[in-house]
Amino acid sequence: MKKKVLFFHFDLGGGGAEKVLINLLNQLDLNKYDITLFTLFGCGVNERYLNRGVRHKYLFKRTFRGLTSIMKLFSPTFLHKILIREYYDVEIAYLENSPTRIISGCRNSNTRKIAWVHVQIDDVKRFFSPYRSLQEAKKCYSNFDTIVFVSKFLENNFLEKTGWDFLSTQVIYNTVDIKKIREMAMTQSSFIVENNVLNLCSVGRLVYQKGYDRLLPVLLRLKNENYKFHFYILGTGELYNNFINYCKSHGLDQYVTFLGYQENPYAIISKMDLFVCSSRREGFSTAVTEAVLLNIPVLTTACSGMDEILLDGKYGMIVENDETALYNGLKMIMNDHHILSEYKQNMREEMHMNDSVIDVENLIDL
């Protein structure tokens, strides 16, 4: 008999957590597991990549605002009862907020319950805002057999901020499909980079968390200091028009190109001299991980997981998490391209990453 496993997530949109979830589900052994993915919303851009052997169910076809607030009106036990209508041997909440609250409501003692944490806690009250109170959040997390963190930094951060010493925890890095990434990078592409300039890129949603609002002024300073570069930004988001207008009004549109969402970002990333992450917060950055797998050096702000991905600076430069540090780091690299050569030399060694699929299967099989 196959073990019945439920993964519960918010949606299959274009975010990093959604991508790594698809990577994980597509690599789990379907001869061992009967897997169901339940999302609150359907029709995400990553849905098309899901293995057909994985059953996908969703509550609402399209996204809308306010569902988390509505769900707070009902107890986790009630929500689980009306949403999760069949028995599963293992139920996995793959996101911190509503999915974790709902799965915590499972009252079947034979079901193993696992929760994933992808982001760090800066503000405890905001992090647990999907719950009625911090007391309810504590009770919900106590119902899980294991809490999985995608980096050691996140595990330490969570335990320090909450003070909850009763949790059974484990670190499992995000799942990446190395073979697929490298094959897609080799795909013929019409994208052509400029010659005689430093070509840089970043991949991420155009939202406050990703820090593009402080990266663009840094690029403006470098442009005004006559540095030769071209910066490509891959992604969409609510601040797109703000950033486009900023570049146009400051004469940056000849230096910065917004490429939007790309089904194959790897064919573009692989042509770059440097990958830049300007985020204020990350969990375990999928985009930075993928850049390293493509042997592209990285400059990143100090976020969760970066020391682990870049092997304490072996594959790239980690700067303080502010605008001045971004500027100084980029300027240092632009003044001395040998820094990039050294990072690329280090990358000839295989990036060390645990086999997260095996780790997840071992967790499911407990």
Image: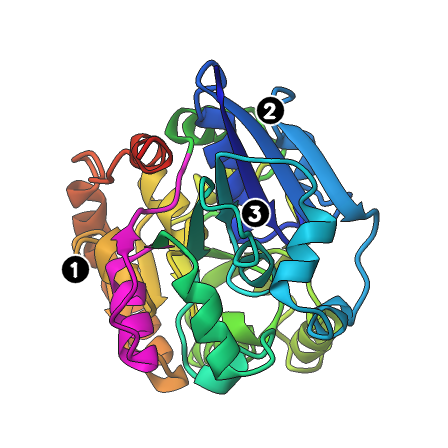
Residue 319: where, in percent of width, then height? 27, 73
Q: Which mark is residue 51?
A: 2
Give the label, 1 or 2, closer to the camera: 2
Judged from the image, the secondary structure of the residue bearing numbered disc 2 is loop
Q: Residues within 10 Å of mark 2 (few under 14, many from 20)?
A: some
Residue carrying label 1: 312
User: Which part of the image, by quadrant, shows the C terminus?
Assistant: top left
Q: Looking at the image, which is closer to me, 188 or 37?
A: 37
Residue 300 lies, with reference to residue 146, above or below; the image says below
Residue appearing at x 30%, y 32% in the figure: 362
Q: CA distance from mark 3 to mark 1?
A: 26 Å
Residue 99: where, in percent of width, then height? 59, 57
Q: Residues within 10 Å of mark 1 (few under 14, many from 20)?
A: few
Which kind of residue does numbered mark 2 sit on?
Asn
Q: Which mark is residue 166?
A: none
Judged from the image, the secondary structure of the residue bearing numbered disc 3 is helix
Q: Which residues are magenta?
A: 148-176
Judged from the image, the secondary structure of the residue bearing numbered disc 1 is loop
Count every numbered label the image shows and give the total: 3
Q: Is residue 337 visible?
A: no
Residue 194: where, in percent of width, then height? 52, 49
